[in-house]
Structure formats: structure tokens, C-alpha cells
Image: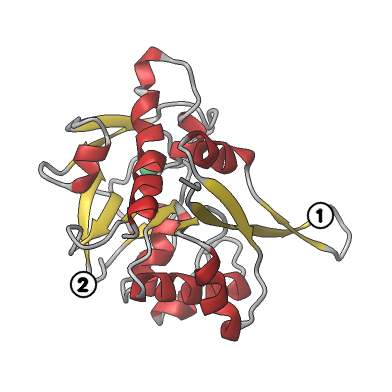
Amino acid sequence: MSKPVIGVTLFRREKNKSNSKYGTISCNYVKAVVEAGGLPLLVPIVNQPQDIKHYMGLIDGLLLSGGQDVSPEFYNERPIEELGEIDPDRDNWELKLFQEAYRQKLPVLGICRGMQLINVGLGGSLYQDIYSQLNNSLQHTSKKEETCAYHKILIEAGSQLEEILCCLDSLFVNSYHHQAIKEIASNLKIVARSDEGVIEAVEAEDSDQRFLVGVQWHPEDLAGVDDNSLNHNCFQQLFKALITAAENGS
Ligand code: MN
């Protein structure tokens, strides 16, 4: 059987001081998809809405990668001073990709910004900066390595995520985000939170009919880490679940 093709979205940044922009992606996303049995296909930011359906015809699943803050214009807020770097062209393109994937019930996994984008794409909103907008939020931006298990998350019993993550009720994850979901979209449910309540994972309200999972942490950076304290196999299971759903067509 041929491998399911997983579209992986790209981060766009200027290189050094040149005016040229580069589409980049951490190789850990690519590696995680490959090791889970998928065929990664990198999807550039092209802003050609008429080509969205063509792109969808090429892929069996969509992986929305991490990156800059989602521009608050997409959830009808004015930017606050603490907002980080934004790329509205990327937001616009990825929102269209996601919304078409959602319409077609294509399997989608969103990571960090990807989870936030899913929430915005379905009508939810974000904290533009958790440190200035959320009381008692522990430090979610780690100064440590990406492979560091930094804070605990509590996983919702009976969720699809619980099943994927080796049936654990809690797990230590890495954390380097300063934004988080504020109002959850109506078609999503919260399936993991940090100790003090920050939303760390979501899945589709109708998760029996589609694969749609978003996580605030970075499983791709933990999947290959050989550390017994990390349950690294569980992180790889997230990618495996995406590939399995892509093979099954939903
Ligand atoms: Mn966190």
C-alpha cells in the first residue's frame, strides 16, 4: 500500500539582513512523519486560494506547524503591545488550507501555532500574550532545550488524545509559547490543560467522525528523544495516529 501523503506547512522568515524570504521547517516534523509511515510534502505559502482544492487533492492529511503568532485581526481583536511577530499572509493561507481540510474531513494535526490556528479557523480566540493577560500562568516559555519536559499536563479521561497518548492521565511536555487559546471554538473540545488551566490540547467535538487534534507543546521535538523520563513513544503516537487516520481517509 502506498504511504499516505501529509502536507506540512512552512514557517516563513527573512534570512539575516537580506530581503529574501525563506520557507523553512524544523526537520523534526519531517522525521516524525517519516518514522510514523507517512510521506511528508512541504506546502509553501502561495496565497492562491483557487489552488486550495488542488493542494487538498495531493494530500491525505495536514500537519499545521508551529511559528509566529496568529494575527489578532483573524479573531477580531486589536493587537496589544505584547503581541509577537506575525505573518498575516501565512495566517490567511493556512486558515484557508485548514478550513478546506476541515470541510473535507481530512485528518489534521496542529502543533503549537497550528493548534491556535485551528481554534481561530473554527471561530475561537487567543490570548495574545499569556503573561500580561492571564493571572497565575506559570512560565510556559522555557529557556531550556526543546527536548526538556518542562511542565505537566492533565489529559481528559475518555478523550481521543488519552487513547493516543498511551492512556496516560498526565504527562510532562515541553513548552515554549506565549500565546494560548482563550475562547474555545464551538466545534472543539478541550482535552488537556496545564496545572493552572492553560489549554494544552484540543480535539474535534465530533472526534468519532474525524481526526482533528491540536497540541500546544512540540511532540516532534520529543518523539526522538531517548530519555526514560519522557515517554517519548507516546509523542510519536500522535504522528502515528495522524498517519493511521490519513490511511483510513478520515
Ligand atoms: Mn505550555
Q: Extreme front residue here?
A: 1
Q: Nearer the viewer, residue 102 or 118?
A: 102
Decide if residue 247 is in sight here: yes
Picture disc at residue 43 = none
Q: Nearer the viewer, residue 223 or 85?
A: 223
Q: Is residue 122 above or below residue 155?
A: below
Q: Which residue is rendered at x = 20% and y = 38% of the image?
A: 163
Q: Give the image quadrant in which the ligand numbered 1 is located.
A: top left
Q: Position of residue 121 (x, y in %)?
A: 39, 73
The residue tagged 2 is 186
Instruction: Say what secondary structure mark 1 lies in.
Output: loop
Label 2 close to label 1 by CB (< 8 Å):
no
Q: Is residue 120 above or below residue 34?
A: below
Instruction: Say what secondary structure mark 2 lies in.
Output: loop
Q: Nearer the viewer, residue 118 or 52?
A: 52
Q: Position of residue 115 (x, y in %)?
A: 39, 57
Q: Extreme top residue here?
A: 228
The residue tagged 1 is 15
Q: Position of residue 131 (x, y in %)?
A: 40, 52
The kind of residue tagged 2 is: Ser
Q: Extreme left residue here?
A: 158
Q: Which residue is rendered at x = 21% and y = 55% of the image?
A: 190
185 on left or right of 44? left
The kind of residue tagged 1 is: Lys
Q: Nearer the viewer, residue 163 or 16?
A: 163
8 on left or right of 132? right
